[in-house]
Image (cartoon, rainbow, N blue to C red):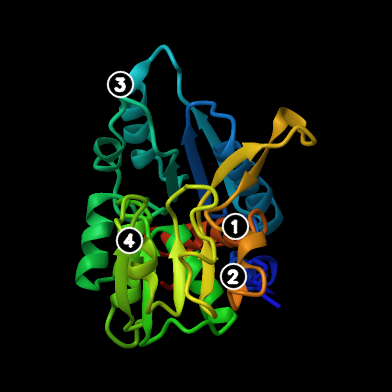
């Protein structure tokens, strides 16, 4: 049997850490606040956005939806980020990504103080990640590691693989996995959807972290028998039985991997809820880093 690695207990563990800090806020004081900037998107980001709001409300965090004016174009995004960066009532800012041209996602994040970049994908936070200094790391990467740690997957000091090379997920995750002790100290192979022989690239991996966004990329034809799979990918396939005619899937084919992989995160219900909980914890940490919170970092 392939073990299903549910995200709910890992998310609750992170939420307990957030509550432990938030309970110490004096009565009447403003709690940490997250602002989520987006273009009014539907699809996967809408699901993520709704999860953010629900989690923030359940923890007692402030939450603001900042919807960009589609007629305003890139200048509206840059103006919005400047205002949020100056606003002392906002402690964390998340920007929807990827954004279509001519929006410049990284230019926008460059206007944001690294303490407020709670998704850890701005240049300064990524630079801190590269050099092992304190800062925010991408919530989805930390969520993936939290799942691996909670379920005691073989990823510390062992061969692992990351499938995906984006600057917001795949490459930061590879860096986190390769960090020296007390980090995971893993030997990391980075592959992607165009890797010529994916089976060979994954052949020694004991745990595979996949964020390629390619449905059914991972089958028993490419995954080593007994490997664990943390499925970060998010895509959709036609399904007439579902509202809208499609359903959400990850990179892994769960039917093919059943009884072959040792463990697998489901999609949905795996990495997703942990990512939301990690984002809330990053927001609490951002509040602790900023002057005037009265908190101890």
Mark 2 residue crowding within 10 angstroms, few (<14) / some (14–19) / many (20+)? many
Q: Residue at horizontal 59%, vertical 56%?
A: 272
Q: Earlier in the sequence, mark 2 or mark 1?
A: 2
Alpha-carbon distance for marks 2 and 4? 37 Å
Q: State whether residue 91 is above or below residue 243.
A: below
Q: Quadrant of the C terminus?
A: bottom left
Label 1 SS: loop
* Quarter assignment of residue 163: bottom left
The residue lying at 24 percent from left, 36 percent from top is 107
As helix, strand or loop, the secondary structure at mark 3 comes to helix
* Furthest residue toward top: 71
| Sequence-wise first label, 4 or 1 | 4
Pointer 2 or 4: first along the chain: 2
Is residue 294 among the parts visible in the rendering?
A: no
Residue at the image position 34 percent from the left and 69 percent from the top = 200
- Real-space Cα separation, disc 2 to disc 1, in angstroms: 28 Å
Residue 259: image location, x then y, percent: 66, 74
Front-lying residue, 124 or 233: 233
Badge 1 density bin: few <14, some 14–19, many ≥20, Cα 10 Å: some
Lateral position of residue 170 relative to residue 148, left or right: left
- Find residue 29 and report its image quarter: bottom right
Pointer 3 with pointer 1, Cβ within 8 A:
no
Image location (x, y in percent) of residue 103: 31, 27
The circle on residue 205 is none
Q: Position of residue 165 (x, y in %)?
A: 31, 54
Which mark, residue 253? Answer: 1
Residue that carries the numbered disc 3 in the rendered image: 75
Mark 4 vs mark 1, CA separation in Å: 18 Å
Q: Earlier in the sequence, mark 3 or mark 2?
A: 2
Contact between labelled residues 2 and 3, with CB atoms less than 8 Å apart: no
Against 35, is 286 above or below? below
Q: Residues within 10 Å of mark 4 (few under 14, many from 20)?
A: few
């Amino acid at each position: 049997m392939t073990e299903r690695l549910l995200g709910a207990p890992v998310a609750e563990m992170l939420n307990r850490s957030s509550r432990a800090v938030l309970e110490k806020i004096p009565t009447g004081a403003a709690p940490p606040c997250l602002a989520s900037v987006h273009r009014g998107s539907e699809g996967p980001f809408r699901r993520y956005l709704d999860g953010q709001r629900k989690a923030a409300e359940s923890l007692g965090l402030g939450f603001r939806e900042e919807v960009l004016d589609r007629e305003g174009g890139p200048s509206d995004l840059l103006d919005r980020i400047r205002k949020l960066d100056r606003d002392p009532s906002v402690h964390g800012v998340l920007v929807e990504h990827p954004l279509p041209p001519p929006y410049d996602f990284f230019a926008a994040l460059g206007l944001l103080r690294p303490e407020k970049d709670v998704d850890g994908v701005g240049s300064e936070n990524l630079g801190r990640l590269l050099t092992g200094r304190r800062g925010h790391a991408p919530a989805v990467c930390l969520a993936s590691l939290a799942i691996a740690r909670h379920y005691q997957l073989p990823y510390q000091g062992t061969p692992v693989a990351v499938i995906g090379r984006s600057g917001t997920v795949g490459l930061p995750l590879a860096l986190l996995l390769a960090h020296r002790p007390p980090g995971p100290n893993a030997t990391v192979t980075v592959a992607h959807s165009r890797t010529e022989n994916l089976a060979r690239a994954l052949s020694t991996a004991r745990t595979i972290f996949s964020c390629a966004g390619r449905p059914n990329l991972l089958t028993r034809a490419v995954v080593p028998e007994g490997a664990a799979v943390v499925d970060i990918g998010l895509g959709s396939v036609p399904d007439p039985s579902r509202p809208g005619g499609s359903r959400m899937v990850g990179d892994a084919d769960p039917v093919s991997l059943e009884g072959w992989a040792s463990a697998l995160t489901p999609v949905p219900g795996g990495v997703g809820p942990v990512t939301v909980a990690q984002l809330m914890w990053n927001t609490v940490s951002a509040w602790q880093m900023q002057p005037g919170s009265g908190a101890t970092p």
